[in-house]
Amino acid sequence: MRYNKRGDAYWPGTVIGRYFPTPMWSDLTDEQRAELANIRHVWKVGDRFYKLADTHYGDSQSWWVIAMYNGLPTEGHVRTGQTILIPTPVGRLLSFWGF
């Protein structure tokens, strides 16, 4: 498989799909972390990142912010009873990451 300049994946003569690079973000500095408030949440059975994002951000599609902030790519990486942090304000955190 090859990729053209637009990022389309193709096999000779056929466009199969589009390749989107994975975004990269840096670790936060101590100064940046000091500008955020963290809501502590103890993970319970039935918890989901999208539910927490909806509750705290009013937007379930921002679930990935909580996941990435905690270094937990999916709910399968969280143990029941584990404390995770929900960073606020979310707009400030996203600005640190360049969004």
Image: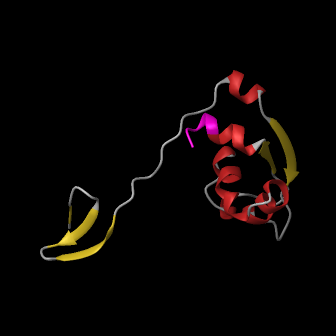
Residue 37 lies, in percent from the top left, at: 83, 36
Q: Residue at x 72, y 57 (%)?
A: 78
Residue 47 lies, in percent from the top left, at: 81, 66
Q: Nearer the viewer, residue 43 or 34?
A: 34
Instruction: Check if residue 57 falls in the magenta segment.
Output: no
Q: Which residues are magenta?
A: 95-99
Q: Left or right of 12: which side holds 57?
A: right
34 over 65 or under it: above or below: above
Q: Quadrant of the N terminus?
A: bottom left
Q: Left or right of 89: which side holds 97?
A: left
Q: Residue at x 70, y 21 (%)?
A: 31
* Residue projecting furthest to the left: 12
21 over 13 or under it: above or below: above
Residue 55 lies, in percent from the top left, at: 85, 60
Question: For residue 13, what is the image quadrant?
Answer: bottom left
38 over 49 or under it: above or below: above
Instruction: Check if residue 96 falls in the magenta segment.
Output: yes
Residue 92 lies, in percent from the top left, at: 70, 37
Q: Residue at x 69, y 63 (%)?
A: 75
Q: Main secondary structure of the magenta part?
A: loop
52 over 34 or under it: above or below: below
Q: Quadrant of the C terminus?
A: top right
Q: Residue at x 64, y 61 (%)?
A: 74
Q: Nearer the viewer, residue 24 or 15?
A: 15
